[in-house]
Amino acid sequence: MSAKSSNRLLQTRLNKVGHLVIGRAPDGGWNWRMAGILPLWVLAAFVASSLVVSTVLFIVNWLNLPIDSYVRPAVLQTVLAVVVYALTLGIVIAGPSLLKRPIVSLQTLGLTRLPSWTDIGLAPLTYFVYVIVIAMFLSLITSWFPAFPLDQTQDVGFKALGSRLDNILAFLTLVVLSPLAEETLFRGYLYGKLKTYIPAVLAAVVTSLLFAIVHFQLNVGLDVFVLSLFLCGLRSLTGSIWAGVLVHMIKNGVAYYILFVSPLIGG
């Protein structure tokens, strides 16, 4: 192969990497206005969904309905968290149709295909790299701020679960439904649309910031911000959210084991 051909091949590969990381600007240029509106739209939908769920729960309590007889409060909160994400997703997808705008496509959501063997292979590898990176990052943070809390358990009563039924419901909501809902909303809808408006790397940062914000706690927010960067990268690399869903399931599955299964075995 001649030097000219080698340089051309190298340039082609660099262009592919550049398009993967930065993205390709549309003919009309980047749309910074929509890039500012879209995260606010998702955040507004999340707040509205939270208010709807909170209002329903308030009415249930006000009517003294015996909901505690069917599900423990800790389990109820895990279920409601998934409901909030699912309702948010429904609002952001169905909302534009009320204004006679095109409904979000499966391609935008990264759902044009089923999980592949590539997704299955990338998921544990990505999770392994993520664990190393977040461990180094948190080590650096605690060296600067020794009082920084390292407990990654969110304040939703997860540690209060006890019975086998509680644990089964926790598994379904935390390990299965929550990753599906969160990945479809953030790496599917938000990141999928943002990277058509602004460079992909900036879209990943904005998506990850909003993902961290809705998790409320500072320590958890830092963790999921780093996680989201990896998941956005997988979305761009594979063109689908499935690898990210699997990574998210692995992460939540490990947390589920540590919080719920391990104490039962030890007890």
Image (cartoon, helix red, strand yellow):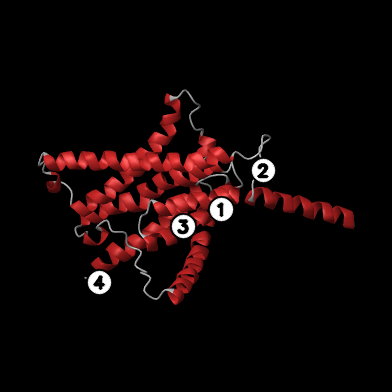
Of the 4 image quadrants, the one containing the N terminus is bottom right
> Is there a contact, CB below 8 Å, between mark 3 and mark 4?
no
| Residue 241 seen in the current view | yes
Residue at numbered disc 1? 233
> Is there a contact, CB below 8 Å, between mark 2 and mark 4?
no
Q: Residue 15: x, y in percent?
A: 73, 50
State which tag comes first along the sequence, 3 or 1: 3
Residue type for callout 3:
Phe
State which tag comes first along the sequence, 1 or 4: 1
Residue at numbered disc 4? 266
**Alpha carbons under labels 3 and 2: distance apart:** 24 Å
Residue type for callout 1:
Gly
Query: Residue 24's mark?
Result: 2
**Alpha carbons under labels 1 and 4: distance apart:** 38 Å
Dot 4 alpha-carbon crowd within 10 angstroms: few under 14, some 14 to 19, many 20 or more: few
- For the point 52% across and 64% down, the residue is 129
State which tag comes first along the sequence, 3 or 4: 3
Residue at numbered disc 3? 225
- Numbered disc 1: secondary structure: helix
Marks 1 and 4: which is nearer the front? 1
State which tag comes first along the sequence, 1 or 2: 2
